[in-house]
Image (cartoon, grey):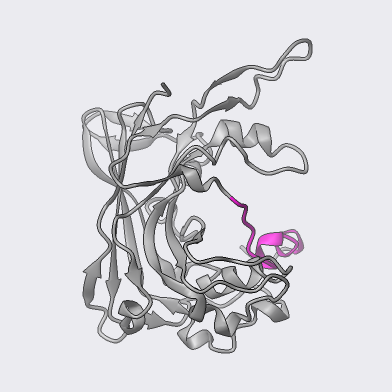
Amino acid sequence: MFDSPLEKRNPFYHMPTGYYGNPRGIVISGTPVRRFTGLIDGQFQRDGPALLGPSQQFDFELELGIYISKPSEAGKPIPVDEADEHIFGFVLLNDWSARDIQRAESGGPTGPFLAKSGCVTVSPWVVTMDALQACVVPRSHANILPFVKHLDDKNDLSSCLDIRCQAYWSGGKAKDFLVSEAEYKGTYWTHRQLLAHQTCNGASVGTGDLLGTGTMSMFESEEVGRCCLFERSHNGSKDIDLGDGEKRTWLLDGDEITFKGWAHDAVSGKRLFGFGDCNGVVVPLL
C-alpha cells in the first residue's frame, strides 16, 4: 500500500506532524468532557455570517502523553539519541476531536483550532522512564522512506516501549465495548523522534510540557486497530456495531470512553503494571 509515488509524497512519511494545544484544557480522568462548539464544515453561508454550533462528529483519539522533565535551550535542537534524557514519563491521553469543526478549520493553510483545544484527558498516574526500562524494545516495523538526518535514530533497537492500550465505549445499551486497541511499538514515529523534530527549528521545551504521540492506529487492521472513530468508521460512512442494538458513528452526549494501558516486559511479554484508567463522559456545552 506504500509503493505508489503519490503515497511516498505524503509528508507523514518524511516528518511527524503536530500542533500546539491549549494547556488549560488538560484535565484528569473522570472530568466531564464538554462537547466542542465551533464553525461547522458545510455550514458556511455565501451571504452573512457562518454558523456556530456544537460538533455533530465528536471523536476520541487513543494516544500516549509524554511529560518533559529536563528543559532544552532555545535555538539548540535536541538530538534524537539524547531525547530520553528530557523525558520524565508517560500517561494515557485522549485527544478529543470535533471532526466537522476540524474540516472547516483545516480547509486552507491552517490547522485545527477550536476542533482540538477544548479538552484533553490524561490518566492519573505518570509512569516514569526509569520504571519503563524493562519495556524497551525496537519499533515493530521498518520505515517506509529513509529518515531525515535529525530523525535517524542510531539506537533504533531500543527506541520504543512495549505499552499496549485499549479503548472501551459505553453508550445507550452498550457497556464497555472494545472499540480500539494499540501497541505503542507499532507506531510510525517514536517519542524520541517527536521531541527531536519539535526542537529542530530551535524551539525549546520546558519542565512539565506535555506531548501527545498522535493516534496509535495499526493500519493493517480494519477494525479495533483503528484508534479513533474517524478511522474506525471510515469518516462516518460505516456504522460501528456496539452490540445490544446500538450502532454508532460518532459520540453522543452521555457516551463514555475509557482507555486502559499496561507496560509489558520486553523479554517475556508479561504484563508488568498499568497506567490507571483515562476516562471521560461527553456532556453538552454549558
Is 226 positioned to the left or the right of 40 in the image? left
Q: Would you identify the image quadrant in which residue 50 lies? A: top right
Q: Would you identify the image quadrant in which residue 272 lies? A: bottom left
Q: Would you identify the image quadrant in which residue 153 lies? A: bottom right
Look at the picture and state if 210 lies above or below 283.
below
Q: Nearer the viewer, residue 8 or 90?
A: 90
Q: Position of residue 112 (x, y in %)?
A: 63, 41
Q: How many marks?
A: 0
Q: Position of residue 139 (x, y in %)?
A: 48, 77
Q: Which residues are magenta?
A: 5-20
Q: Residue at x 54, y 75 (%)?
A: 192
Q: Residue at x 51, y 71 (%)?
A: 191
Is 231 positioned to the left or the right of 260 in the image? right
**Viewport quadrant of the C terminus:** top left
Can residue 146 be seen here? The reply is no
Q: Position of residue 166 (x, y in %)?
A: 31, 56
Residue lying farthest to the top in this orientation: 47
Look at the picture and state if 190 lies above or below 171.
below
Is 43 positioned to the left or the right of 166 in the image? right
On whether residue 6 falls in the magenta region, the answer is yes
On whether residue 99 falls in the magenta region, the answer is no
Q: Position of residue 70 (x, y in %)?
A: 51, 74
Look at the picture and state if 223 lies above or below 14.
above
Is 20 positioned to the left or the right of 168 in the image? right
Can residue 117 be seen here? The reply is yes
Q: Nearer the viewer, residue 285 or 204?
A: 204
**Viewport quadrant of the N terminus:** bottom right
